Amino acid sequence: MTMQGYQQAYLQAQNVTESPRQTEYRILARITSAMIKAEQQGHTEVVRAVHWNRRLWLTLQSDCASEDNGLPDAMRAGIISLAIWVDKHSRKVLKREADLAPMIEVNRNIMEGLSGG
């Protein structure tokens, strides 16, 4: 699937009865769960989970770079910075130079913010 296809799927998911925050939380929860499980299942599953996480963060980065995004500039910049970090850390994980724990923690922190915690 292309980046445009992922963005379209992301936008379509927002049209469901849940709020965008709920959609983002749900997607992050599924991906984070997949990363946690992948740690016990071996490198092939780690690769799948990392790619899924990376695609989400690239979509968030693209959305935040859009002039149509309604988030405050500082928040958009923070999300873009996190997305860049996720991309760099993902490469290290895929080369077995780092583990998933920091990315899992980032996702959990974002989920906490989305839930109002």
Image (spheres, rainbow, N blue to C red):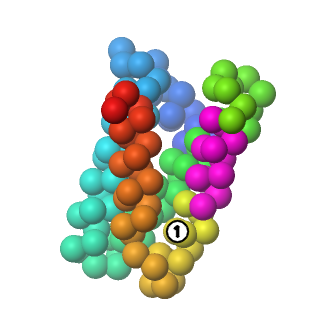
Q: How many residues crowd around disc 1 within 10 Å: few (fewer than 14), some, or many (20 or more)? A: many
Overall secondary structure of the magenta stretch? helix
Image location (x, y in percent) of residue 10 = 51, 34
Q: Nearer the viewer, residue 74 or 27?
A: 74
Which residue corresponds to mark 1?
A: 90
Q: Is residue 25 magenta?
A: no
Q: Of 14 and 36, which appears nearest the observer? A: 36
Q: Quadrant of the C terminus?
A: top left
Give the residues drawn in magenta, as a range. Answer: 75-85
Q: Secondary structure at mark 1?
A: helix
Q: Amino acid at mark 1?
A: Ser
Q: Is residue 66 left or right of residue 44?
A: right
- The answer to which image quadrant residue 49 occupies is bottom left
Residue lying at the far right of the rendered structure: 67
Can residue 56 be seen?
yes
* Quadrant housing residue 19: top left
